Amino acid sequence: MPRLHRFPLAIFVLLAFALPVVRAQQPAPDAPKEDSVRAHYTKYEFRIPMRDGKRLFTAVYVPKDAAGGPYPFMMDRTPYNVGPYGEDQYPMHLGPSPEFEKSGYIFVYQDVRGRWMSEGEFIEMRPHIDEKKSPQDVDDASDTYDTIEFLLKHVANNNGKVGIWGISYPGFYTSASIIDSHPALVAASPQAPMTNLFLGDDGYHGGAFMLSANFGFYGPFFHPQKNPQTPAPTVPFDFGTPDSYKFYLQAGNIANLDKLYLKGSNWLFNDQAKHDTYDAYWKARDLSQHMKNVHCAVLVVGGWYDAEDLSGPYRTFNAINQFNPQTPTTLVEGPWVHGGWARSDGDHLGDVQFDAKTGEYFRTSIQFPFFEHYLKGKGAAQAKAVVFETGTNVWRSFDTWPPKTATAKTLYFHAGGKLSFDPPAEAKGVDEYVSDPNHPVPFVCYTTNTVPQRYMVDDQRFASYRPDVLVYQTDPLEEDVTIAGPISPRLKIASSGTDSDFVVKLIDVYPEDYASAPPNKRVMDTPPLFMGGYQQLLRGEPFRAKFRNSWEKPEPLTPGKEADLNFTMPDLFHTFRRGHRIMIQVQSSWFPLADRNPQTFTDIPNARPEEFQKATEQVFHQKDAASGVEVLVMPKM
């Protein structure tokens, strides 16, 4: 039976609007943290009416200590479900971190429109409507506004202030919620927010489809639904092999993944794959162009090594600053994978050590004080940018991002695999390799059927040994070199094909005598880790040459004709230490992280086997055709 609660008077009014709630099964009675939440919070479940009449399922957790209030709201809107369902079912924890649960907030979790127990139609990254002409013009900004209105009126002992946070897809909903923001919404933290899926977030990077991550997400995990329902267990996809390289290569083109495996069951995956140019579908979902009338303080969070939404935080941060220059906005970036700041110590990634519990520091010293300041009037505001400098492994604060003192310099390619800040002087200079889409360069050197989060700092020596990868590196550095901000390849290329990808990777090469990781930094019973000569990936991105002049209207390459490829990779803050080398690798495949380019100008998702052809790729490094990578270099300390 459901537990009986002593309801605040206003909540009795709300129950008149409530529909029956499907209850989850009772969990096993061995959850001490759940019991702790139950002991200090009372749970209510409501279906909150929106302006168009649809009702959104919302779970609200109110502190039992009424004398400690009034309390602010902390809200999380998600497409992933707000379970456990049932007023007598409690989660293991509440809020972004334990500090919030102990401090006292009214926690609000909501299934977004059309997901799980909420009514309405789910639309992938629902486009924002700038001018709403009728109650039927709804989006996630209006749904949040209506939810806040309702909560303020019907949940007792609130202080009239609302905060909202979310990671990844919930980060998108957080960003959407602050457009034309409700007056009571005073603090928001979009974290790894999906912002533009074609221009650098989950879907496409440089025009290349992020194959393994997208099929892994939409295939077995994220499915459409027709009616309100509670979540069913996710059935893992059976690849039939532990080797995703083998699986995707044998599948052939992208269309075959649907034909052979999904069989039309998931239009969400097909939408991602078939919209392979920057068309109206993607433009309508670019939330950054709508980030206006943001009246609340914003803490934008991202990870330097986020494999899913690396670009979203920068697009969101820059858009808020552009359209709302008076709005207090802070960018936080640390050495984290996707969501790593919320659920790990953040002291290492793969073989790379950061010598500090960066996740814990963020939760206790950045995130919690931010919300306490704006929702409870405690403490001080944050700096404009709070960023972790990898290499030296220290936190730094700046009043702008990128820092004003950073100067643009170009790392130029030279003959013999040399790399330096000096432009080439030779009249003739070109390197070439043969790219075979039927034997693509793998993105990791080990067997996996997923996208390992550690790949973004993995050792790249395996790639440097391949004949279809160009390698350029500096001499050992005589002093530290610190880069801060975006990384911009500037390539002069030619190809024997009519289309090709060019993957550019920025790498930190450790000295050959670099000390190995101490035993307490390694997992027991694993082989010794020798970091001497380690080629640590810092940033890597593909670029599809047919998009060199336009994301909307791709153009074929003219075989043998020189072309400019100018693009920008997401920001970084890293110090190459004295004695290390800076390395750039260039290749034409990165599989199956990105889909294969047939190297013929064709409809790639439906490309036929005979259209996947070898191509000879050329990269020029001469006086009148210099190739390199532009970075922003900090002044010497």
Image (spheres, rainbow, N blue to C red):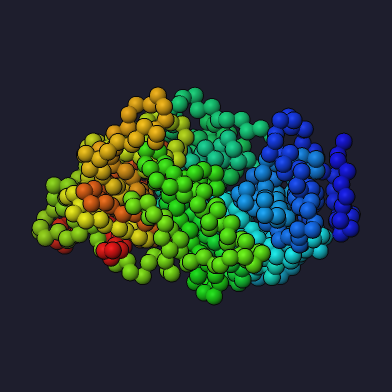
Q: Is residue 125 left or right of residue 7?
A: left
Residue at 70% x, 36% y is 32
The answer to whether residue 493 shows anywhere in this view is: yes
Return the residue nearer the eye: 296 or 540. Answer: 296
Q: Residue furthest bottom?
A: 326
Return the residue nearer the eye: 347 or 572. Answer: 347
Q: Quadrant of the N terminus?
A: top right
Q: Position of residue 7 (x, y in %)?
A: 87, 52
In the rendered view, would you say 18 is above or below 229?
Answer: below
Residue at 72% x, 41% y is 36
Q: Is residue 460 left or right of residue 73?
A: left
Q: Position of residue 555 (x, y in %)?
A: 36, 56
Return the residue nearer the eye: 422 or 242. Answer: 422
Q: Position of residue 348 (x, y in %)?
A: 42, 42
Return the residue nearer the eye: 502 or 167. Answer: 167
Examine the image and state in which quarter residue 247 appears. top left
Q: Residue furthest front?
A: 67
Q: Quadrant of the C terminus?
A: bottom left
In the rendered view, would you say 319 is above or below 5?
Answer: below
Residue at 21% x, 48% y is 579
Numbered marks: total: 0
Examine the image and state in which quarter residue 454 appears. top left
Residue at 45% x, 64% y is 385
Q: Position of residue 505 (x, y in %)?
A: 31, 48
The answer to whether residue 139 shows anywhere in this view is: no
